[in-house]
Amino acid sequence: MMNNKYKLKTLFWEATLRCNARCAFCGSGCGEIQSYPDELTGDEICSALLDISGKLDPSEIMLNITGGEPLARADVLEVAAYASELGFSWGMVTNGSLIDEKKTARMKSAGMKTLTVSIDGCRETHEKLRRLDGSFDRIINSLREISSQGFAEHLQVTTVVNNQNIHELEDLREILLGIGLNSWRVVTVDPIGRALSNQSILLDKEGMKRYFEFTEKYKADSKLPVIQSCSHYFGEWEHRLRTRCFDCGAGKKVASILYNGDIFVCPNVERRKELIQGNVRTDSLADKWINGFDFFRSRKRTVSGQCRGCYYKESCLGDSLHTWNFDEERPMFCIKDYYSTEQINIYSRKEQLYNAALSRLKAECSDASVLKISCDKPSECRVFFERSAAKQLFSYFEWGRNTRNNEIEQMACLIGREECGMFVISHISPVFIDLADRESAVFTKETLLSAEKALRELKENDNRLELIGFVHSHPHELETVLSVGDAELHRRLTEKKNIKLSMLVNPHKKRINAYFGERFELAEIYIAGSAQELEKTEISVWEK
Ligand code: SF4
Ligand code: SF4
């Protein structure tokens, strides 16, 4: 039976383990051996891709070609071109030192969408860490050339931050600014592979703090945004560094074909025999994806040891799988190692206050049921709709009905109070929006004035009330996720008007989302109402 819950989004193909570099922190320890007789042939990988494209939708899968050094393999771009023909988008992660004019032309004709090139410091540091003398200028020139040709949709540099390059990130940024990159992915070195026996390269607490401060400073930089990888849960720094919360997708949306054809999760994870799901020489990766990968989809990692009972466990889930110590069943990276006990106690107190406020609110509407709607991860923010507000929400947006009103965008303001970091909504009140262009409504000065008027009137009976935010509908098939326009509106209101919450509903699809904070964290939503009413709402949150 088709397993719909887990959609394969990223498929790594480890084209080879051969590599012309020998990085001091290489996760796979590549570069020592230059011949792998069991490496998949071009025909074998092509036939595996053909099988996948027949059973899963290739247009939804990003094929990420990695290594070793993928360009050390002569036919890599031929395979990539074939993947394009099959309908996959593809990208490559490379050390960049083997890119030349001919390869650039072939990347272009083979339809390359993304290119990620590793640069680990300014010239001297980079060449020392990668043990690739004379490579720095060549890589920068190749990147400039690819950027000027404009065929890659996303051109990125990735830097592994360690204690030998942490002090030169600002200088490196100056160099990278002139290249025409779309993003700079700045990640921390992990205690795996070669870095395990070279631990002096790992960041200490001070280094980690500098790393956080640097990435926060440039995360929204319009010239060169600094982005995170999927790795590591960063606790209270999550919202400050990321646009999306930590989510290790290994086995849930990420799989790989290793150099020898083994079917695996993420190639960075320890390659234990019992975790290998098969081999594309004899098995179908698509079948395995649908019926296998059980361990990776369970929550076994947090049932014991230091993660059990951890305050962060619902969000962190034992951190990245690639830094999980399978023998000792413990994480090798844990954000708590970088916090003081005092800080952690503050966070637990915050959690206790949330829980107390939630229990009180539930008790206050003892005759009602409370429906909890949330994405997979618990959030730092909860929105509680009191019974009256929930009723207004469903009736104003004509929930579940296909009416004329529901064919255009509608908006209401959210009025209530803030308690222990929880937004308690007691009223929703329709507001004016300009529908001159019926495709997209416009939030105007009048919108805000109508919200403020509603607040003034309600405040006459309860002066604790404040304007918490706005909720608007995404009619028809428009997904209930924050669009660029929504995000911009949310940002403007947050910065200029102290508005904290933006909600989106799709009454047709019965979907709802709530966002808060400048990085658009998804909030947990609680709705109070009679059991019957709530049953009919069939509400679901749109997870993305
Ligand atoms: S194992 Fe690590 S690299 Fe792989 S998906 Fe998880 S966090 Fe990302
Ligand atoms: S103890 Fe486990 S769940 Fe808690 S923060 Fe550390 S790695 Fe994450």
Image (cartoon, rainbow, N blue to C red):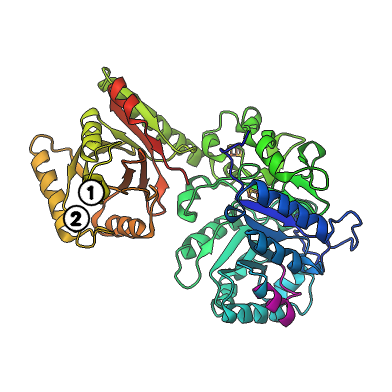
SS at badge 2: loop
Label disc, if present, on residue 433 of the rendered structure = 2
In magenta, the rendered stretch is 94-108
Which amino acid, mark 2?
Answer: Ile
Where in the figure is residue 505, as x and y percent of width and height?
A: 32, 43
Instruction: Locate residue 94: give its quadrant.
Output: bottom right
Residue 99 magenta-highlighted:
yes
How far apart marks 2 and 1 lie (CA) works out to: 7 Å
Task: Classify 10 Å Cα crowding around label 2: few (below 14), some (14-19), many (20 and above).
Answer: many
Can you say whether 438 is above or below 544 in the image? below
Q: Residue at the location (69% across, 44% down)? A: 286
Q: Which mark is residue 411?
A: 1
Amino acid carrying label 1: it is: Met
Q: Foreground: 513 or 31?
A: 513
Quadrant in which residue 29 is drawn: bottom right
Contact between labelled residues 1 and 2, with CB atoms less than 8 Å apart: yes
Residue at image x 67%, y 79%? 142
Name the side, left or right, on which 51 lies relative to 353: right
Indicate the position of residue 385 as horizontal and vertical percent values. 28, 33
Q: Residue at x 37, y 47 (%)?
A: 515
Q: Does 101 sit left or right of 518 as displayed?
A: right
Pick the front one: 231 or 335: 231
